[in-house]
Amino acid sequence: MTSKTSPESPLPIRTVLQMVGGWIGKLGTVWVEGQITDLSARGGTVFMTLRDPVANVSARVTAPRGVYEAAVPRPADGARVVVHVKPDFWVNRGSFAFTALEIRPIGVGELLARLERLRQLLAAEGLFNADRKRRLPFLPGTVGLICGRDSAAERDVLENSRRRWPAVRFKVEEVAVQGPYAVGEVTEALRKFDADPEVEVIVIARGGGSLEDLLPFSDETLVRSVAACRTPVVSAIGHEQDSPLLDLVADVRASTPTDAAKKVVPDVGEQLTLVRQLRDRGRRVLGGWLDREMSWLTSARSRPSLADPVRGLERGAEQVDALRDRARRSLSGSLDRAEDSLSHLRARLVALSPAATLERGYAIVQDPSGEVVRLAKNVAPGSVLTIRFTDDRLTVRTEDGTSPTTTKPRKPRKKASDETG
């Protein structure tokens, strides 16, 4: 077409629109899924807007009243439906719309089945594993809160948190929490808080609602965004019985927005009570330990070795003196006994010595060989004999065996006692 047009020979707008209508008409019919909004009826035609459940995309749909009323149950604003449509282009207005040929509401059972399939898929990938969940900080400096605009959930979280810990700070992002814009806005707020270094915990809060109202919090895009966050995320969606997939992937699940405030922020009164109890317990433990140590010290000081240390030294000195005296007595007794024994032995030796016999006037006659002469007949005439007295000796020569000739006496070499000794 561009080759056949120019500024000098343009095509009329009707021709172009007719060509566009022809192209669209070639698409045929198609089944589409979406959420109904802006539902209205005029005459025999029902007008509605069909929004994509995830992206911010919508299209106008017209349906004959008979087609609309044939749907059971009859869909209303916010309902999820599957529509068999034929794309149409109105050349006169240059507008595009779908014409509904059949409308089928998506029942709760079908929604639950889809959520179960998505849950199994995400669980198989490990997004719900407990080991990847992070612990919340004890006292976060700043809490990021994602909630609806002027919602009761926002008031519950803020009021209960500040009642528990007045100094806590919040950064609040108000977003759509249901409808076609919810997933995109919540995901964008989540990424913003995750990139903020001041935010230590992110809370996603919404009050209760129907299954269809809470569907954005089971959206796969949002669930994967929460799993990819570096900041701990607390899910506080609906009531206790509500369990969107966001509860499974979040690091902490709170049953209600009020419960989220209790999990994120500690109670200052409870913490002061705990500190007081721990302080009292520490005092009791320390006091008991000091009492035991003082008792031990008192007992140690009462021992004689510490109560009167000089007395111990005195007893030791007394023992040394007693042992010394005992040793002296023992040694002295041993010496006395030895001396007495020596005297007795000396007296016996003197009594048995030949010198003692000589002192009584006896003499000892010895031949030249030194043998004692006991009989005169044993001496030959002319033999030289030595007569030994106590202090000296005399040499004689025999003449006839009976009359010895006296010679000059000699000085004895030793005393008789010395020789015997």
Image: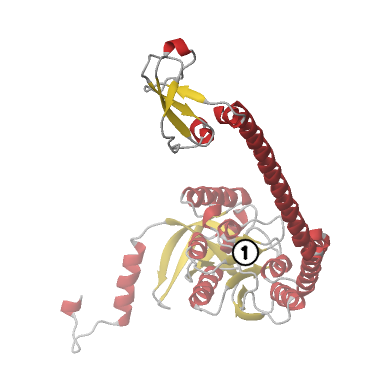
The local crowd at label 1, few if under 14, some if 14 to 19, many if 20 or more residues have their Cα within 10 Å, is: many
Up/down of 318 relative to 201, above or below: above
Comparing 283 with 210, the one in front is 283
Question: Residue drawn 61% across and 81% down?
Answer: 171
Comparing 286 with 50, the one in front is 286
Q: Is residue 287 left or right of residue 9?
A: right
Q: Quadrant of the N terminus?
A: bottom left
**Helix or strand or loop: what does disc 1 sit on?**
strand
Up/down of 268 relative to 86, above or below: below
**Residue 246 x, y percent position in the rendering:** 58, 60
Name the residue type under label 1: Ser
**Residue 165 x, y percent position in the rendering:** 73, 77
Is residue 393 in sight in this rendering? yes
Q: Which colour assignment does the render follow?
A: secondary structure
**Residue 4 x, y percent position in the rendering:** 17, 78
Question: Residue drawn 65% across and 78% down?
Answer: 149
Can you identify the residue that label 1 sits on? 235
Looking at this rendering, what residue extends furthest in the left direction?
Answer: 3
Comparing 71 with 362, the one in front is 362
Comparing 338 with 2, the one in front is 338
Is residue 40 in sight in this rendering? no
The number of discs equals: 1
Q: Is residue 58 left or right of residue 290?
A: left
Quadrant of res 78: bottom right
Looking at this rendering, what residue extends furthest in the top direction?
Answer: 377
Quadrant of res 369: top left
